[in-house]
Image (tube, grey):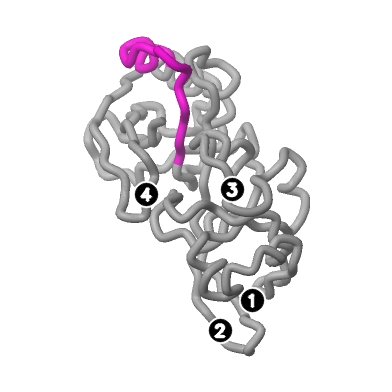
Amino acid sequence: IYTLNTHLVDDRWSSGRVTGAYVSTINESAPSVLRAVAVLHREDVIITDAGENRQVLVHWVTEGFFDLFGLPMAEGRAFTPEDHRTRVAVIAHHIWNDVFGRDPTAVGRTLQMATGPVTIVGVATPEFDVPQRTDVWFSFSVSPVAVAHNYQGYLRARAGTDPERLRNELATVMAGLAAEYPQAPSRTRVTVTHAHAPRRNGPTSTNAPARP
């Protein structure tokens, strides 16, 4: 499992974020990649049954996010391909504990948030913490032609994939995107960082650059 980051090749500052076009094209064109996903950061407020407001960190994730990490839900299910069309959420284990007292009937209940009500479909396991300190996950989809660098990216490579092969495949993807989207920054490289088990004390990582 890797995180995806982008950098300008002349070492000018960049956000490191990826685009919808990157994620979609990697899924379509990189044979060594089982799944690449995009993640969008937001903040929201949970309104508890007691009428209290609790600030929460929300991440919107694309199809296959939880499957990519290979962890089951503690309760309920992960997102399905159609969930981005509805208002559903997976909540972190600590939210399940603090707000719902670990009540198993929390799955299927409505979670009142400042941006509107959502239906809880799953509870993550206690150790799952990607991105770090997430409280609630929503499902969304990205445009395959979006070129704005708005997203964090993750990918899972096929078992036994040689890192050099993965670098070369991603370099090919970047070269193709540079030709297809000339309006986007043309001298961009993508790096993949090997992310270990997603625990609440934070993953460790090592760098593995992929250059176009």
- Is the residue 92 above or below the residue 163 in the image? below
Mark toward the start of the polypeptide (3 vs 4): 3
Task: Tell me if mark 1 has few (under 14), some (14-19) or many (20+) residues whose alpha carbon lies within 10 angstroms of its own.
Answer: some
Task: Tell me if mark 4 has few (under 14), some (14-19) or many (20+) residues whose alpha carbon lies within 10 angstroms of its own.
Answer: some
The answer to whether mark 2 and mark 1 are in CB contact below 8 A is yes
Amino acid tagged 1: Ala
* Secondary-structure class at tag 1: loop
Task: Tell me if mark 3 has few (under 14), some (14-19) or many (20+) residues whose alpha carbon lies within 10 angstroms of its own.
Answer: some
| Viewer-closest of 18 and 107 | 107
* Secondary-structure class at tag 2: strand
Amino acid tagged 4: Arg
* Residue 73: numbered disc: 3
Q: Quadrant of residue 20?
A: top right
Residue carrying label 4? 199
Is residue 87 shown left or right of residue 31? right
Amino acid tagged 2: Asn
Q: CA distance from mark 2 to mark 4?
A: 27 Å
* Secondary-structure class at tag 4: loop
Residue carrying label 1? 114
Mark nearest the camera among 2 and 4 is 4
| Viewer-closest of 169 and 93 | 93
Q: CA distance from mark 3 to mark 4?
A: 14 Å
Residue interval drawn in magenta: 153-169
Residue carrying label 2? 53
Residue 83: x and y in percent read 74, 47
